[in-house]
């Protein structure tokens, strides 16, 4: 099939792109490899909470409804919102469709999928990172006989009741999972550097306001001196504050190796025996479908200006982090970067092929 624009992925970034594309008159599709709506949110653990109220987490055009009885919405609430969003705007989503490769075919780009070929004048890649979890390699990792799992495999603290659990990582996922698991198990929190906690009165609402001022500053042609990272890394949502009250928010230095029964530090080989290690160590962009194009630099990164790939302006990347737009991996940030990407892409692609 031939279209003007193909969006790969129909999570929050893909839906934001779809909203703006439908206003251009261009013929477009969203190809999503998930059987159900909701993007990565449908796979998050049960107790995950957004960092801000629903009113501060909208996609373009429609504010997220509040979740009754919950100031900070759950992942399930976000899934319901994304599902309703794609229905509200009748976005042309095909699922499940897995895009294997994108190749240049003359003036067109060709997408090979498990449901056939698509030819397009431009591609927006919005596949996110959830399908590419990162687990660092540590000495002894192959000999450890306990359970090792990444954030993507975590569901509930109940399954660790009565166990000893090491939680690795210094970000929000580690803090929220620690807060829950510590209610059922003896926990040890380790991180490569000391975690930085935001003040209790700083959450997504403040980050939203800071980002808004930052965008206004750049729009006026002035230097952006706002550095959100100075506020800290971990948002003190209610569960994390409760964990602090229980005295469990103490992070230890990263262990040096694993043994068959636990983790160890130093020449003295101080050991902490454990039943499980939960790696809250982040993700890498899921960009395997673009591997056949000449987009990557020698480090394996795709250089961009805004969201546009340097080496092929027909390809835009949405939602992979600050390198593809300020806060683009958040719900509200995805909408903002999608607007700019679609505007630039529509100018390049030109008028719709059909009246």
Image (spheres, rainbow, N blue to C red):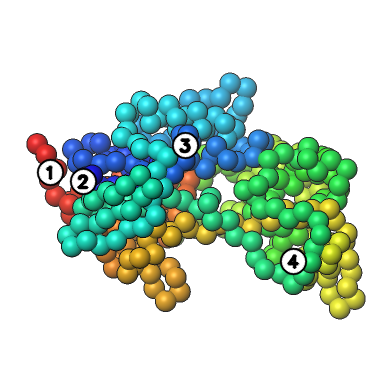
Q: Residues within 10 Å of mark 2 (few under 14, many from 20)?
A: some
Q: Mark 2 falls on what kind of element?
A: strand
**Quarter of the figure that contains the C terminus:** top left
First in sequence: mark 1 or mark 3? 3
Vertical side of 320 occupied by 353: above or below:
above
Instruction: Point out the residue furthest to the left here.
Output: 355
Distance CA(mark 1)–CA(mark 2): 10 Å
Q: Does residue 126 appear to the left or right of 199 in the view shown?
A: left
Towards the viewer: 348 or 246:
348
Towards the viewer: 209 or 62:
62
Q: Residues within 10 Å of mark 3 (few under 14, many from 20)?
A: few
Q: Mark 1 falls on what kind of element?
A: loop
From the image, state whether disc 4 or disc 3 is nearer to you: 3
Vertical side of 258 occupied by 125: above or below:
above
Quick check: can you spot residue 116?
yes
Q: Residue at x 54, y 39 (%)?
A: 41
Residue 274 in the image, given as x and y percentages of width and height: 85, 56
**Residue wearing tag 4:** 141
Instruction: Say which mark, if any, is on residue 2.
Output: 2
Q: Does residue 25 appear to the left or right of 118 in the view shown?
A: left
Residue 20 in the image, given as x and y percentages of width and height: 28, 39
Q: Residue at x 32, y 69 (%)?
A: 294
Quick check: can you spot residue 317?
no
* Quarter holding residue 295: bottom left
Q: Mark 3 falls on what kind of element?
A: loop
Q: Residue at x 77, y 50 (%)?
A: 249
**Residue wearing tag 3:** 35
Instruction: Say which mark, if any, is on residue 15.
Output: none
């Amino acid at each position: 099939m031939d279209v003007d624009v193909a969006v790969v992925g129909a999570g929050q970034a893909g839906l934001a792109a779809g909203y703006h594309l439908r206003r251009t008159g261009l013929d477009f599709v969203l190809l999503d490899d998930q059987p159900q709506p909701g993007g990565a949110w449908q796979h998050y653990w049960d107790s995950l909470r957004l960092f801000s109220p629903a009113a501060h987490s909208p996609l373009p055009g429609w504010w997220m409804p509040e979740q009754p009885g919950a100031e900070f919405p759950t992942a399930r609430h976000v899934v319901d919102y994304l599902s309703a969003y794609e229905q509200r705007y009748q976005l042309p989503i095909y699922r499940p469709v897995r895009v294997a490769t994108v190749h240049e075919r003359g003036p067109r780009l060709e997408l090979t999928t498990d449901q056939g070929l698509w030819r397009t004048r431009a591609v927006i890649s919005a596949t996110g990172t959830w399908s590419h979890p990162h687990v660092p390699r540590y000495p002894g990792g192959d000999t450890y006989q306990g359970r090792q799992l990444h954030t993507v495999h975590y569901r509930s603290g109940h399954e660790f009741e009565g166990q000893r659990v090491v939680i690795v990582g210094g970000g929000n996922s580690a803090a929220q999972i620690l807060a829950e698991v510590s209610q059922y198990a003896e926990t040890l929190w380790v991180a490569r550097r000391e975690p930085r906690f935001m003040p209790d009165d700083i959450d997504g609402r403040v980050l939203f306001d800071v980002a808004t001022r930052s965008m206004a500053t750049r729009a006026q042609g002035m230097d952006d001196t706002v550095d959100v990272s100075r506020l800290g890394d971990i948002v003190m949502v209610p569960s994390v504050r409760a964990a602090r009250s229980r005295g469990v928010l103490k992070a230890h230095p990263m262990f040096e190796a694993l043994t068959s029964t636990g983790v160890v530090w130093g020449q003295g080989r101080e050991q902490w025996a454990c039943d499980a290690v939960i790696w809250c160590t982040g993700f890498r962009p899921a960009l395997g479908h673009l591997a056949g194009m000449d987009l990557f630099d020698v480090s394996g990164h795709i250089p961009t200006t805004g969201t546009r790939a340097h080496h092929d302006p027909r390809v835009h990347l949405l939602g992979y982090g600050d390198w593809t737009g300020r806060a683009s991996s958040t719900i509200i940030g995805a909408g903002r970067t999608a607007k700019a990407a679609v505007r630039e892409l529509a100018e390049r692609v030109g008028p719709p092929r059909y009246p």
